[in-house]
Image (cartoon, rainbow, N blue to C red):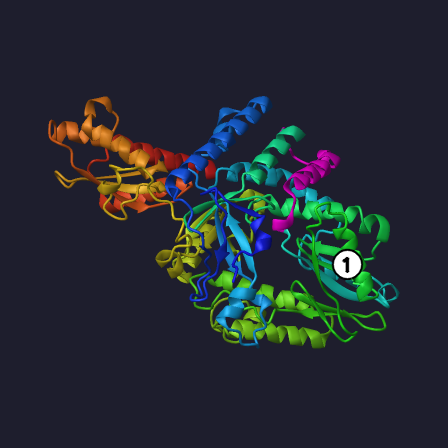
């Protein structure tokens, strides 16, 4: 049974070979994988990936340099948005398990044959990520000018509540879901719609000094270079937007709005119509009228790719689910609504035993009850909604969650937990934010109380540590970056993993001649930094400022160098975080090779950062 069916073949192009590909989801496994049936000529995944990645990096940097020169940006801004050491996006196929009836037993074959998937493409650290962030930041305010767009998932209730019984009488609330919205968006049409709306509301946007032409070029680069990897192979998405690319939601919302503007906002004059990305809610007197509404929107799509699935109530007694609400309108035009959770949705939320501070857990509980109360139109519906929340929280280890909601205390004898205790007397603009790891509740309270007692303008945010799944499992098992250099001389020198691909690392160098240590950090790849150290110990005189070169000149002159590397931390993209972590390991290992000048520079950097924050 086809994992990526014939309809989807037009969306994907296999870039590893000129031959066509067919994909199946094997019935012998429940893993979410797709496999090639054909056996095309083998092309090196590594060499192909590197070639494409480097080309995209170069194109991104050339485009940004050209735009920066025309906008007279300073060198710091230019460097900030240049791409370095990137990797191609990776696709994750998330099964839409909510499409199955949880009360009906199905076989593996049924699941594989009929289960729909949601393709999520992770663009983190991709060559276009920084440029994507720029256009996302510039174009986000456009959503304020899209009348159908729901800014939050409860705005539709407020608007329906403001309609009179006469306005609602004879109407029913129905929902419509756009089928595969992102992957059915015409890219060139989407870009043109974004540019059109941007031009109409140019005065309301902070464009950073960019022109419409600049924005158009960036959008073209971000949306058209839709390469991704899956199972160690390279693909190009030919139609549609990446679900995972930062400006994609804006593009999809604006594209559909342009269809709406030329149909329901021009000809039909629908009394109520709102949409949250691909989920729309509206009013109609019959199912036929509901179909006319969505078909009028679809007919504006020149590619005829926009398809809808409608949920219209069979009777006046039926509720229609929309987002986290259920809505119905009775014969008298009275609006009824209550809280909703899909039956297929797992009863999982922030667990009572999770490694988070009490304030976060209390805030989670309060938000659930607040949402349930807001979504309920009568006391009876409110009690029904509250019971849904009760069941959810009890299943996640909370005892008497309604008491917690009322008192703000997880335990009856504990003091009231304030969600942001350090900011109670401090205006948001008058404090600095300090992020600390959450160790335990007494430590968090002691730190917060110290800041309060000394009137320090600091707001503390306590973040939980890594979960076991993050430590023991990989989210990219098939596409994990690995060394692609033939006969690499650095990888064998690394004691664990033997992989020099990671970047933004904290590392340890061991001189195997005397067992002395050196601790360092770099934003570059481990290969680049370790190669530099290796050259330094081989030619100490050419690297007078390198601590390892000075060590070998003083203690091992004219002796064959012998060093090894350990990668202690990876993916520390924040400079200050790398410096702090480096200082921690220097204090832990007390390396003798790190010279005094280096330590003083590190101390000076940290002090300067602290002074800037204060």
Q: Can residue 403 be seen in this view?
A: no
**Residue 294 location in percent, x, y?**
76, 56
SS under mark 1: helix
Above/below status of 590 relative to 444 = above
Looking at the image, residue 263 sits to the left or right of residue 457; the answer is right
Query: Residue 552 appears at what percent x and percent y?
Result: 16, 30
Total tally of numbered discs in the picture? 1
**Residue 100 image offset from top left, x and y in percent:** 58, 69
Identified at 62% across, 54% down, the residue is 180
Q: Which residue in the rendered view is the most extreme toward the right?
A: 166
Q: Which of 134 and 236 is in front in this view?
A: 236
Residue on which the image places disc 1: 159
User: Residue 236: in sight, yes or no?
Assistant: yes
The residue at 50%/47% (across/down) is: 20
x, y percent for residue 550? 19, 28
Q: In this view, does 59 lie above or below 571?
A: above
Q: Give whichever of 441, 23 is nearer the camera.
A: 23
When asked about the image quadrant of residue 439, the answer is bottom left
- The secondary structure that dominates the magenta segment is helix
Question: Residues in magenta?
Answer: 182-209
Q: Report if residue 201 lies within the magenta region.
A: yes
Q: Which of 558 and 277 is in front in this view?
A: 277
> Residue sitting at 60 percent across and 37 percent down?
135
Crowding around mark 1 (Cα neighbors within 10 Å: few <14, some 14 to 19, many 20+) is: few
User: Quick check: is 311 in the magenta stretch?
Assistant: no
């Amino acid at each position: 049974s086809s994992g990526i069916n014939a309809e989807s073949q037009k969306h994907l192009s296999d870039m590893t070979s000129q031959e066509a590909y067919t994909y199946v989801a094997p019935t012998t496994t429940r893993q979410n994988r797709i496999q090639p049936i054909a056996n095309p000529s083998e092309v090196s995944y590594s060499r192909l990936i590197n070639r494409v990645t480097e080309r995209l990096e170069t194109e991104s940097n050339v485009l940004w340099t050209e735009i920066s020169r025309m906008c007279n940006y300073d060198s710091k801004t230019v460097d900030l948005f240049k791409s370095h050491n990137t990797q191609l996006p990776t696709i994750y196929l998330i099964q839409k398990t909510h499409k199955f009836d949880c009360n009906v037993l199905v076989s593996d074959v049924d699941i594989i044959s009929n289960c729909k998937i949601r393709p999520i493409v992770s663009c983190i650290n991709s060559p276009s990520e920084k440029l994507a962030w720029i256009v996302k930041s510039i174009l986000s305010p456009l959503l304020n000018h899209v009348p159908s767009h729901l800014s939050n998932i409860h705005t539709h209730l407020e608007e329906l509540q403001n309609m009179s019984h006469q306005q609602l009488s004879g109407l029913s609330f129905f929902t419509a879901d756009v089928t595969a919205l992102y992957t059915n968006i015409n890219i060139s049409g989407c870009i043109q719609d974004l540019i059109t709306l941007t031009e109409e509301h140019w005065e309301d946007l902070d464009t950073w000094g960019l022109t419409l032409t600049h924005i158009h070029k960036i959008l073209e680069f971000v949306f058209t270079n839709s390469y991704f990897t899956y199972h160690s192979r390279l693909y190009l998405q030919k139609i549609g937007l990446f679900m995972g690319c930062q400006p994609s939601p804006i593009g999809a919302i604006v594209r559909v709005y342009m269809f709406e503007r030329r149909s329901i906002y021009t000809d039909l004059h629908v009394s109520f119509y709102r949409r949250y990305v691909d989920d729309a809610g509206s009013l109609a007197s019959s199912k036929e009228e509901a179909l006319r509404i969505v078909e009028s929107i679809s007919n504006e799509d020149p590619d005829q790719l926009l398809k809808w699935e409608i949920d219209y109530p069979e009777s006046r007694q039926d509720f229609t689910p929309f987002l986290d609400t259920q809505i119905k309108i009775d014969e008298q035009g009275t609006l009824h609504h209550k809280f909703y959770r899909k039956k297929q949705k797992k009863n999982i939320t922030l667990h009572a035993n999770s490694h988070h501070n009490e304030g976060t857990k209390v805030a989670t509980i309060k938000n659930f009850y607040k949402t349930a109360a807001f979504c309920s139109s009568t006391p009876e519906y409110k009690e029904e909604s509250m019971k849904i929340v009760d069941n959810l929280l009890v299943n996640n280890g909370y005892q008497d969650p309604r008491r917690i909601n009322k008192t703000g205390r997880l335990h009856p004898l504990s003091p009231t937990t304030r969600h942001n205790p350090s900011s109670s007397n401090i205006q948001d603009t008058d404090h600095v934010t300090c992020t600390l790891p959450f160790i335990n509740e007494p430590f968090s309270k002691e730190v917060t109380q110290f800041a309060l007692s000394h009137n320090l303008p600091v707001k503390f945010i306590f973040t939980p540590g890594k979960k076991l799944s993050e430590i023991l499992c990989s989210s990219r098992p098939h596409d994990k970056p690995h060394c692609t250099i033939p006969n690499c001389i650095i990888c064998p020198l690394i004691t664990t993993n033997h992989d020099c691909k990671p970047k933004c690392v904290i590392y340890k160098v061991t001189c195997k001649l005397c067992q002395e240590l050196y601790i360092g950090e770099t934003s570059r790849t481990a290969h680049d930094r370790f190669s530099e150290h290796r050259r330094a110990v081989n030619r100490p005189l050419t690297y007078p400022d390198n601590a390892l070169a000075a060590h070998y000149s003083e203690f091992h002159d004219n002796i064959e160098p012998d060093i090894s590397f350990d990668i202690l931390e990876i993916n520390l993209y924040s400079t200050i975080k790398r410096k702090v972590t480096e200082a921690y390991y220097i204090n832990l290992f007390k390396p003798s090779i790190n010279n005094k000048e280096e330590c003083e520079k590190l101390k000076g950097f940290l002090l300067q950062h602290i002074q800037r924050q204060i």
